[in-house]
Amino acid sequence: MNANVIRFPGSNCDEDVLNVLKNVLNLDAEFIWHDETKLKNPHLVVLPGGFSYGDYWRAGAMAKISPIVPAIKEFAKEGGLVLGICNGFQILTEIGLLPGALLKNKNQQFICDWVNLRVENTKTPFTTLYKQDSVVRIPIAHSEGRYYIDEAGLETLKKQNQIVFRYCNPAGKLTEESNVNGSLDSIAGICNPAGNVLGLMPHPERCSEAILGGIDGLPLFQSIVKTFQPA
Amino acid sequence: MWRVKATVQLKEGVLDVQGRALEAALKHLGYEEVEDVKIGKQVEFVTKEKPPTEKLKEMGDKLLANPTIETINFSVSEVKS
């Protein structure tokens, strides 16, 4: 299995993602600079976190016109797996691979903390190794993570089972307190209707090794690997 | 020469947390009459020829605004040399 990790000017979680793919999961993985126009035959494309283009004007707004984007869109259209983490999620909404938008956190602060997420959909290639409705502990670090979509859009997400992770308390309940950034319906991560594109604000690559304080992010990457293993 | 000024704001129905904070601050200063504070951002640029409305709308849709959450308004004026 081969993965491409896209680097935009200002991406800063690229090394962490590559570390999980190469050193923890022993996959072939390489960086693709945003200026390239072709991917390198990946099974998985990851848009990592960070501050692409400094979040200038609007987070993810300028990354969407990077030369590599048409190749990513084509790859997703053909069913390739695309994972957007944090700024990567923001970029996926900006380039139209995922619906909705990410706004400034409700408390207007940059929040860097562990959060609890409830796994809502274990049918995607990214979540098959999680238990339905299980609570996982994954860190967030963002200032613009408040998910928003209009009413009709939310109904569609629910109908098509596109909500993959929600912020919750340790007991798995959705509360105002556990929804730290004020996201609509406590949404932390969503997928496209086909399930091959996932975007989430929390950082699974920061908790895929025990030494970092938790490994609840690892099943996400392991699920992807499992997708490509012969049955 | 023409100067274009574009103002981008959050749409109605989208919570403007910074606007709310500024409103609270203004009220705290005694300006109780202030309501519905919106914080937007502005960008301006010049063009040689008068830019057609459709082109400005295109710029808005493609980059300057996120239509999911933002509105954009343009004002165009001639720069007299």
Image (tube, helix red, strand yellow):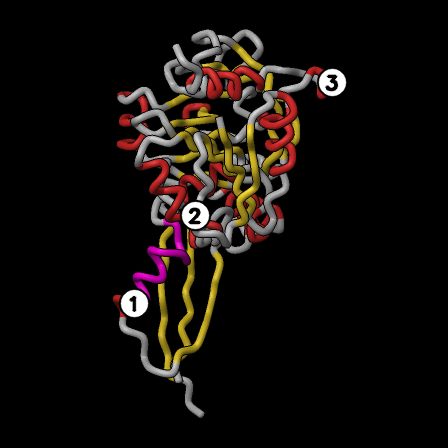
Q: Name the chain letter of the residue that bears numbered label 3.
A: A
CB contact under 8 Å: marks 3 and 2: no
Name which residue lies at 41% across and 24% down: A185
Q: CA gap, disc 3 to disc 2?
A: 36 Å
Given residues A211 and A20, the one toward you in this image is A20
Q: Is residue A18 left or right of residue A40?
A: right
Chief secondary structure of the magenta span? helix
Mark closest to the chain's N terminus, 3 or 2: 2
User: Could you say which disc has been placed on residue A127 in the image?
Assistant: none
Which amino acid type is shown beneath numbered disc 3? Ile
In magenta segment, residue B59: yes
Query: What stretch of residues is rendered in magenta?
Result: B55-66
- Secondary structure under tag 2 reads loop
Residue A143 location (% of width, % of height): 58, 39
Which amino acid type is shown beneath numbered disc 2? Lys
Which quadrant: the C terminus of chain A?
top left
- Secondary structure under tag 1 reads helix
Q: Name the chain letter of the residue that bears numbered label 1.
A: B
Q: Which residue is mark 2?
A: A38
Given residues B41 and A208, the one toward you in this image is A208
User: Could you say which disc has been placed on residue B55 in the image?
Assistant: 1
User: Could you say which disc has been placed on residue A211 in the image?
Assistant: 3
Residue A223 location (% of width, % of height): 47, 17
- Secondary structure under tag 3 reads helix
Which amino acid type is shown beneath numbered disc 1? Lys
Residue A79 location (% of width, % of height): 33, 31
Q: Which quarter of the picture shows residue A23?
A: top right
Near mark 1 (Cα within 10 A), the count class, few <14, some 14-19 or many ≥20, is few
Q: Is residue B8 left or right of residue A206?
A: left
